[in-house]
Image (cartoon, grey):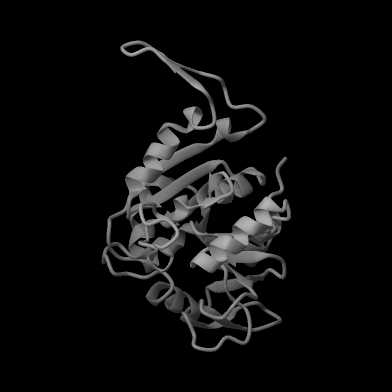
């Protein structure tokens, strides 16, 4: 099953950390947060990635094109071959990564629409943001999504209230309201970690300003096609310099809940 990661935003609120990098490439420890997200998904057997590129997409492309040389010593003979030691104790060699140019100014809905061809004939696919980590049980998320038969599943979490607040039936898990970036949040919010049936593309159009979390998601709500998967564990975006420092501190103390690999 493919994992789509939204990597194209400008990340204006975190420019003071790394003005020359797109937000998904800002590091936690020695690796970009994007790598941490992909590594986490791979632990559940999801190794086929579609990255929706936009702002400074070439930085992400160059990272993966040169991936094998980054952690190693190199001996270079000009005009000849580049020799390097192989990366050890990792399983990234099985990753398939599609680096899709989805437009510099495209919003999330437009970016998703533009990678439809890479989903192929798959009935379902995963989608997440390129700037947040968590310890969401992806196997349980998958079972829940397949069990209800609706078009979309969003993971509902309990962090600071400035994301899409979810109003939903506690028994059926059917979403009744989706308030993107509320002023005051009292319940669960949109934590990403989506699962979609391919019918989601019927809710999208080619408009560059189409925001997935607005018109398309709200229409899913109206149609009764959005379910919430409740996650009570760790979830943290990296949207500000404070959150950057927080995630790096957790990681350096070897206390990162999302680091489930050795």
Asked whether 3 or 11 is in front, the reply is: 11
Q: How many marks?
A: 0
Residue 35 at x, y = what percent?
A: 54, 46
Task: Say left or right for 158 vs 75.
Answer: right
In the shown orientation, is residue 14 left or right of residue 169?
left
**Vertical arrangement, residue 179 with respect to residue 62, above or below:** below
Residue at left offset 73%, top offset 55% = 255
Position of residue 115 measured from the top left corner of the image (x, y, whole percent): 37, 51
Could you tell whether 109 is left or right of 192 in the image? left
Residue 151 visible in the displayed image: no
Q: Nearer the viewer, residue 189 or 20?
A: 20
Residue 68: x %, y % from top left: 50, 28
Residue 228: x, y in percent? 61, 72
Q: Nearer the viewer, residue 246 or 216?
A: 246
State which quadrant residue 256 falls in. bottom right
Residue 54 seen in the figure: yes
| Quadrant in which the C terminus is drawn | top right
Can you tell which quarter of the image residue 174 is in? bottom right
> At 67% across and 51% down in the image, what residue appears?
252
């Amino acid at each position: 099953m493919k994992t789509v990661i939204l990597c194209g935003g400008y990340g204006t609120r975190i420019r003071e950390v790394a003005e020359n990098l797109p937000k998904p490439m800002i590091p936690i420890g020695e690796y970009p947060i994007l790598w941490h997200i992909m590594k986490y998904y791979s632990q559940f057997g999801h190794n086929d990635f579609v990255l929706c590129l936009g702002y400074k997409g070439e930085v992400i492309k160059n990272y993966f094109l040169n991936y094998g040389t980054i952690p190693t010593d190199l001996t270079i003979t000009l005009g000849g071959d580049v020799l390097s030691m192989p990366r050890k104790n990792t399983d990234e060699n099985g990753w398939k990564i599609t680096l899709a140019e989805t437009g510099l100014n495209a919003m999330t809905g437009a970016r998703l629409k533009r990678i439809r061809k890479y989903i192929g004939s798959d009935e379902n696919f995963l989608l997440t943001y390129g700037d947040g980590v968590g310890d969401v049980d992806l196997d349980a998320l998958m079972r829940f999504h397949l069990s209800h038969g609706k078009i979309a599943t969003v993971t509902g979490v309990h962090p600071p209230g400035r994301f899409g607040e979810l109003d939903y039936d506690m028994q059926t898990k059917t979403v009744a309201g989706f308030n993107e970036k509320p002023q005051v949040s009292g319940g669960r919010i949109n934590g990403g970690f989506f699962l979609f049936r391919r019918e989601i593309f019927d809710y999208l159009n080619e408009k560059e300003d189409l925001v997935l979390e607005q018109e398309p998601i709200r229409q899913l709500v109206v149609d009764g096609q959005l379910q919430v998967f409740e996650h009570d564990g760790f979830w943290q975006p990296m949207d500000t310099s404070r959150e950057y420092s927080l995630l790096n501190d957790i990681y350096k103390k070897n206390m990162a809940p999302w680091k489930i690999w050795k």
